[in-house]
Amino acid sequence: MRIEIDCNICLDHKSEEKSSFVRYSCFCSVRDDGIYEFECPKGHRTITVLRTPKHEVLFAIASNALLDGYLRESIASFAASLERFYEFVIRVICRAKSISQQDVEKCWKLVSKQSERQLGAFTMLWFVEMGDPPNALTNTMVELRNQVIHQGKVPTYQECIKFGQAVIDVISPIECKILDKFPDSHKDECFALSKSVIEKHEQPPTILSIFSLLDAAIQENVSFEICLERLCLYRKRKGIPSIGSDLMRATTVHPVRKKT
């Protein structure tokens, strides 16, 4: 998946110039640190920080992989999205409890390399805070995830759709509750990266958000398939082909006849 980064200096000049201007942008591969540096042909250097939380970025990667026909990769990224969401919730609650980020990082190192430990940490923290156990994937979906990641299973397109919807169904009620109970801490966690970049760089960065299928599904209460259709339309406008579940091609063949 690629993200379109604009030269915001050129865009800022738009209001100053009466004549037409050229918009420079670059399609960049997704970076793990969420920080994108771009120099346009005019020599403008800009820093763009992706505000979209990592679990939403991973969900977008999974959805694009699904449209590109990479089915195993789609399931793996959906599963990673859910795991990073658990981490996101833990960090939001810790912020709400005024626990220092240094202490959070020190504690997180103890569980960061094992997904089972992360799930356990999230489950117990959520239960203590909310009084009820959180939603979780069904045994069927867990088995599908394990078969894909650990046994090399190639899922079908419909299995990917079901798994993506299952991840939404787990995340949605949890996200709604933390937005209701910890709105300020939720916002602070979303902007934590951009705040860190501002402190380290003299040049103020541009804050960018991408279209989040996960956020759209939750906020608008629509199905994953509807959000996927929107992503197809976006890719079509950008000239990015979507394979989906089937691809048919007709090719004219001119066989070479053997000489007798």
Image: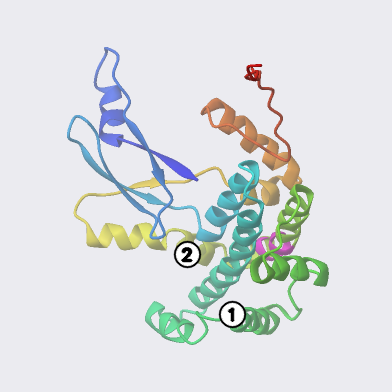
Q: Which quarter of the image is occupied by the C terminus? A: top right
Q: Place residue 240 in its image quadrant.
A: top right
Left or right: residue 110 compared with residue 79: left
- Asked if 15 appears above or below 152 in the picture, the reply is above
Mark count = 2
Q: Circle 1 — which element?
A: helix
**What residue is at 71 percent from the left and 60 percent from the top?**
167
Q: Residue furthest front?
A: 260
Task: Estimate the x, y position of residue 211 in percent, counting from the top left.
Answer: 55, 42
Left or right: residue 229 compared with residue 54: right
Query: Colour mode?
Result: rainbow
**What residue is at 70 percent from the left and 33 percent from the top?**
247
Dominant SS in magenta: helix
Other residues around mark 2 within 10 Å, as few (<14) / some (14–19) / many (≥20): some
Other residues around mark 1 within 10 Å, as few (<14) / some (14–19) / many (≥20): some
Residue ID for mark 1: 118
- Asked if 101 appears above or below 201 in the picture, the reply is below
Task: Estimate the x, y position of residue 60 in percent, counting from the top left.
Answer: 58, 49
Observer able to see residue 228: yes
- Based on the picture, tell me whether residue 208 belongs to the magenta stretch: no
Task: Estimate the x, y position of residue 254 in percent, counting from the top left.
Answer: 64, 17
The front one of 122 and 181 is 122
Residue ID for mark 2: 189
Q: Place residue 220 in its image quadrant.
A: top right
The front one of 97 and 76 is 76
Left or right: residue 197 compared with residue 220: left
- Asked if 89 appears above or below 21 in the picture, the reply is below
- Asked if 244 appears above or below 180 in the picture, the reply is above
The kind of residue tagged 2 is Glu
Please provide the residue range marked out in magenta.
Answer: 170-175
Task: Estimate the x, y position of residue 11 in percent, counting from the top left.
Answer: 31, 29
